[in-house]
Image: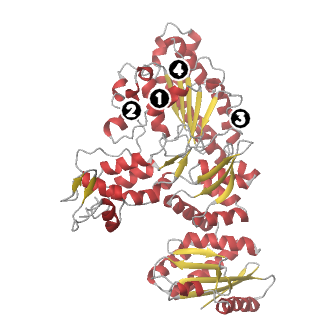
Amino acid sequence: MKTCKEMASVWNVTERTITTFCKTGKIPGAIKVGKSWQIPDDAEKPVDGRISSGRYIKKPAELRSLPIGISDYVRAQSEYYYVDKTMLIKEFLDRKPLVSLFTRPRRFGKTLNMDMLRVFFEISEEDTSKYFRDKAIWKCGDAYCSHQGNYPVVFLTFKDVKFDTWEATMDKIKGLLQEEYGRHQELLKSDKLSKYEKEYFLKILDSTANEVELTVALERLSKMLATHYDKAPIIIIDEYDTPIQEGYSKDFYDEIVVFMRNFFSGAFKDNKNLSYGFLTGIFRIAQESIFSGLNNLTVNSVMDEDYDNYFGFTAEEVSELLSYYGVSEKEDELKDWYDGYLFGGTEIYNPWSVINYISRGCIPQAYWVNTGKNEILEDVLKAATDDITERLHSLLQGERVIAKIDQNVVYRSLSEDPANIYSLLLVAGYLKTPKKELQADGSYLCEVSIPNREIAAVYKSEILSHLLQIGAIARTTANKIAESLYANDYKKLQKAIAEYMDKSISFYDAGAEGFYHGLVLGLIALMDNQYKIKSNRESGDGRYDISLLPRKDRYPGIIMELKWKKDMDTEALAGLADEALVQIDEMRYDAEMKEDEIRHILKFGIAFSGKNVSVKTK
């Protein structure tokens, strides 16, 4: 008989997975002795829960489906597997901040949590307490449960306000206000409201209010609700910064910022008709004075420990989820791909990717990054200096870099200081902070790194897309490199890399430094799945420029030596490439690969002058 620890080593899974197998009866003959399980030596590893297509998990019909794309709390908790986040309500009621802003990356459960708050607090003809009686909040006692169904609530989500023009954006906001006012049509029958208040209400319902009148829509509605119910309302604004981001990228930034400043000021600044306010978004747009003078705003960001486990899944929640669907053996793979975020002091999994991974047969893919555009990375690449490009290279190799993080930065900060890209990438979910230190000015000095394999994949994808977009390399070139590696066609690989070099040098500046950085990032994007890429490392009797060590025996090793001189003609440039090739042999740059018993090694001598390149191979 073997212990769980011993069998975990044999089957190459976690000890927790073995324990789960035993508890669920998946290992015939396993018996519990005291607090430990004993497993027969000849026991067979249980199947992983997938069918051959990899699309579906074999699971009993009574298991609930996963809530992909469901942001309706009532539906999510009644029809789907729901990860209970209702203790967010307790933590809020313990703290009682007047206005709370939660900033988290997209698809981390912000909208679902805000709808949960709406259902919990909102006055309703229906007894909505039934949606919470089996949840964690209900076990906390009457001090918390007495708030249930006790407030009028205003709820707006801007997550779909994504339009190319200011006019279309205003039409959408007008429609959202019309819909929210429509939820409160009981006010039109109220004998506590004046005639002019009802006339304004009808303007919103009829969509005849002008832009100035719309800016006070939240302030007016909160006053009417407070008058009618004799109770100040709760105002919830979900994804408040989505239209602002669109305004930046679509050239109506000034218009949307002015509108939002007035819109939110009336709702949250010195509004006596407000019990509590909640906002969510990706960024804290303080520099644009959206919340100018709002001294009652409490910001809860990815750097803060308050509320750190309510957006995204914790390790414990993921473990329970995997156990429920009978795929606990996939915990290590899921952790590698979708764990790694740090919110405050808590390690967090990406919830969108986790539920898609499980629902699609535990096939690891970049689910989160395919749910929207990655404009932030695009802007970063456009603004990147040589130093930033080199750091991106280091991040892609799994290293940490030192960066100053200022949570108040916005998109336009990139043009002011490209170093702000790290702050943008962090709050948007593309970086994590394994180590941080608060500075006197409120910023943080941090070690930052890429959270997991999914985000590493999007870095590579966006870098490659950027190069393709600006004409540095043709898509056919990328395909040729991938195909030649797959087929072990070294001649085709040499030709593809030469083509890559030729097209790269035609784009990059004549200076060697800018070209070098572009070359390394381009090769990572193209070949990182097959190679570990190193640069400026010692091997043999010197330091090579670029070395690509194969991850699998079937691929050849690749060594590149780069040389650069000004004003060289074609013949001289070819000679310089030959010199680079000779240097690889003379300095024995292949020594490291030979020690690793890499049998096939391709050597590239590459010389460039201005926008001309010569590539020699061996």
Q: Distance between the residues labelled 1 and 4?
A: 19 Å
**Do the residues bearing badges 1 and 2 touch, measured as CB atoms within 8 Å?**
yes
Q: Quadrant of residue 203?
A: top right
Residue bearing the label numbered 3: 289
Q: Position of residue 346 (x, y in %)?
A: 51, 46
* Residue beneath the point at 68% across and 87% down: 541
Q: Which dot marks residue 232?
A: none
Q: How is the image coloured?
A: secondary structure
Q: Where is residue 601 in the image (x, y as percent from the top left)?
A: 55, 87
Badge 4 is on which residue?
A: 233
Which quadrant, please, contains the N terminus? bottom left
> Separation of disc 2 and disc 3 at Cα?
38 Å
Residue topped by disc 1 = 90
Mark 4 vs 2, N-terminal side: 2
State which tag comes first along the sequence, 2 or 3. 2
User: How far is disc 1 from disc 3 in space, using C-alphas?
Assistant: 31 Å
Where is 613 relative to 141, above or below? Answer: below
Helix or strand or loop: what does disc 3 sit on?
loop
Image depth: mark 4 or mark 2 in front: 2
Residue plotted at (54% across, 56% down) = 451
Question: What numbered label is drawn on residue 136?
Answer: 2
Q: How crowded is mark 1: few (under 14 residues within 10 Å), some or many (20 or more)?
A: some
Report crowding for label 3: few under 14, some 14 to 19, many 20 or more residues within 10 A (C-alpha).
few
The x and y percentages for residue 50 are: 29, 60
Mark sitting earlier along the chain (3/4)? 4
Kind of residue at disc 1: Lys
Amino acid type, residue under disc 2 in the picture? Ala
